[in-house]
Image (cartoon, helix red, strand yellow):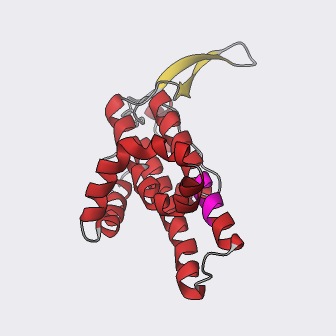
Amino acid sequence: MATLPLLRPSCFLPTPTLKPSLPRHTSFLPLKLKNGAVGARLSNSSSPPPTERLISIAAYTLPFFNSLQYGRYLLAQYPKFAVLFDPIVPFLAFYRSIPYASFVAFFALYLGVVRNPTFPRYVRFNAMQAVTLDVLLVIPHLIARIFSPGRGPLMIWSSNAIFVFSILCFLYGVASCVLGRTPYLPFVADAASRQI
């Protein structure tokens, strides 16, 4: 009959254990406790490698490309502002020339990156934020299709607000990824973190 491990005298000796797997980019920093003992704490202060940053930046192009349709009124009113978007016109033309490109890119990003456990959490979280933002951009489009409000002042104002919000989210997401930080987009980050 086997004895319980707590009843054996050897249970009080330190036993070698396997180290738990630590997330990538984890380092130990010295920690001084209140009783004077020195321990270690985990630190995620090191930034992600450039490949992870690049994948995260590429994920934010999906909602960016899909949000450009909301900028038609603002870009027509301010043509000097539209000049800033001239360098991406060839990429946008290629993206729009592929049938169902938005649909395919959405599922490729969601199934290929977000639900793929081989990618680190940093990449999956950024991809999930991009997917969630893309879903949120579809809602005003569906409302406009259902009610067909025309070109009234409410339609122009709401399209401009959606466009500015999505451009700011894109710029904040890209800048944070370039710096190696995790961006937390308003209205999106909580939903994205629950899905990871």
Q: Quadrant of the N terminus?
A: bottom left
Residue at the spot 74% in from the left edge and 17% down from the top edge: 35
Residue 189 in sight from this viewpoint = no
Q: Which residues make up the magenta segment?
A: 159-165
Near-viewer residue (164 or 74) = 74
Residue at the spot 54% in from the left edge and 42% down from the top edge: 80
Q: Position of residue 132 (x, y in %)?
A: 50, 61
Residue 75 in sight from this viewpoint = yes
Residue at the spot 30% in from the left edge and 50% down from the top edge: 91
Residue at the spot 41% in from the left edge and 56% down from the top edge: 65
* Quarter where residue 158 is shown: bottom right
How many numbered callouts? 0
Q: Where is residue 33 in the image (x, y as percent from the top left)?
A: 70, 19
* Quarter where residue 115 is shown: bottom left
Query: Horizontal placement of 44 versus 19: left or right?
Result: right
Q: Position of residue 148 (x, y in %)?
A: 58, 84
Query: Horizontal placement of 92 versus 68: left or right?
Result: left
Query: Horizontal placement of 51 versus 134: left or right?
Result: left
